Image (cartoon, helix red, strand yellow):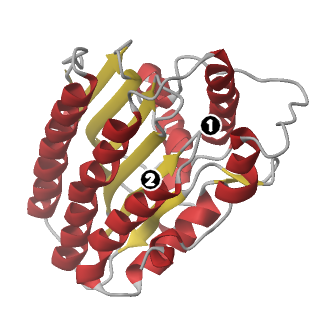
């Protein structure tokens, strides 16, 4: 493992950031991402990109960073305690899209690469993508999971079910007893098959994100909605905030590593709400979101 591998990951994720920003700008049709870049000491690079107040996208944040440091933050060594205090290099792309229309789901994706100095050089990949609808549709969930499977299948039939299960388990709010959304892919500490195979898998997952998400946005972005749908969207966004601030390891890593706080919290929705003791009307779309969608289901398999 050499610096060449880190450079290759950095180049791919940097290019993916540009592709995703371009595609999301096209979907919105008017708003643009800002173009801020920060270069720090020891080759550290941070390129936050945030789009605000678009016609379709209320907020989208696509954040690239390439960092080096004297010691891995605790959030990065929870499963690798032997690496605590070791010098490290980290390359990551993380993104969140909060659409304006309640019928368009929120989406999240993250891809990351760590390299840490130890007796032997340690490295691993992590990441995935997941979908959080407010008004859910079977065809959207099936499409999302079909693309998730397609991203993994060239690397083994076992990966999609493994990563889907891990996603269902990770994006869960124990204090609410419910999932954050309808899942997708999640993996961490991944080094199976060596660097080239693992990196090829990460590229496949990154390349499939837009294929999975953009058709859903295009399908739903013109759906009429009113105050009821908007109020429910803001209420459900509150759940998203709860997960990110209480459970998300990526948020903890950002806070522990001393990253720019505006970048760490750019994943938050611009508006959210907490309604006391809200109970959805029986049989309503709002109730069905929780009873039918926010639980593990074999979405992709049901369509075959």
Identify which residue, 102 or 112, lies in the foreground.
102
Q: Is residue 279 left or right of residue 3?
A: right
Quadrant in the picture for residue 119:
bottom left
Q: Position of residue 64 (x, y in %)?
A: 26, 37
Query: Dividing the image into 4 quarters, which one contains the N terminus?
Result: bottom left
Residue at the (8%, 61%) spot, across then down: 4
Q: Nearer the viewer, residue 147 or 68?
A: 147
Percent from the top left, x then y, of residue 285? Answer: 69, 42
Query: Which quadrant: the C terminus?
Result: bottom left
How packed is label 2: few (under 14 Cα within 10 Å), some, or many (20 or more)? many
| Residue that carries the numbered disc 1 in the rendered image | 240
Instruction: Name which residue lies at 56% across and 73% down.
Output: 165
Cα distance between the residues tagged 1 and 2: 19 Å
User: Of 293 and 82, which appears nearest the observer?
Assistant: 293
Residue at (24% x, 20% y) in the render: 33
Question: What residue is drawn where x is 25% and y is 71%?
Answer: 201
Query: What secondary structure is marked by label 2?
Result: helix
Tell me which corner region of the image, top left, top right, bottom left or bottom right, holds residue 34: top left
- Image quadrant where residue 172 sits: bottom right
Task: Check residue 140 in the rendering and tell me which mark sits there, or answer none.
Answer: 2
Q: Position of residue 79 (x, y in %)?
A: 55, 67
Q: Are marks 1 and 2 in contact (CB under 8 Å)?
A: no
The x, y position of residue 67, in whole percent, is 28, 42
The answer to whether 38 appears left or right of 227 in the picture is left
Q: Is residue 85 visible?
A: no
Q: Is residue 153 above or below residue 243?
A: below
């Amino acid at each position: 493992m050499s610096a060449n591998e880190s450079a290759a990951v950095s180049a791919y994720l940097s290019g993916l950031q540009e592709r995703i920003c371009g595609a999301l700008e096209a979907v919105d049709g008017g708003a643009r991402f800002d173009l801020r870049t920060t270069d720090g000491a020891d080759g550290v690079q941070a390129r936050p990109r945030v789009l605000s107040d678009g016609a379709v996208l209320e907020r989208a944040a696509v954040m690239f960073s390439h960092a080096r440091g004297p010691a891995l933050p605790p959030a990065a060594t929870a499963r690798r305690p032997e690496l605590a205090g070791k010098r490290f290099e980290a390359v990551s792309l993380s993104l969140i899209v909060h659409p304006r229309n309640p019928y368009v789901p929120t989406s999240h994706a993250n891809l990351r690469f760590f390299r840490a100095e130890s007796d032997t050089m340690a490295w691993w990949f992590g990441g995935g993508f997941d979908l959080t609808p407010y008004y859910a549709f079977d065809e959207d969930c099936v499409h999302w999971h079909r693309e998730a499977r397609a991203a993994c299948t060239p690397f083994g039939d076992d990966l999609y079910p493994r990563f889907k299960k891990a996603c269902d388990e990770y994006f869960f709010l124990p204090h609410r007893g419910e999932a954050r959304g309808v899942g997708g892919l999640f993996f961490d500490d991944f080094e199976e098959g060596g660097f080239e195979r693992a990196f090829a898998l990460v590229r496949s997952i990154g390349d499939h994100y837009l294929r999975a998400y953009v058709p859903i946005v295009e399908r739903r972005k013109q759906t009429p909605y009113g105050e009821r749908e908007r109020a429910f969207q803001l209420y459900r966004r509150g759940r998203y905030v709860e997960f990110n601030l209480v459970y998300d390891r990526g948020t903890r890593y950002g806070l522990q590593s001393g990253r720019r706080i505006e970048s760490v919290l750019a994943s938050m929705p611009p508006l959210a709400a907490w309604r006391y003791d809200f109970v959805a009307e029986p049989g309503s779309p709002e109730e069905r979101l929780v009873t039918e969608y926010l639980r593990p289901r074999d979405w992709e398999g049901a369509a075959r």
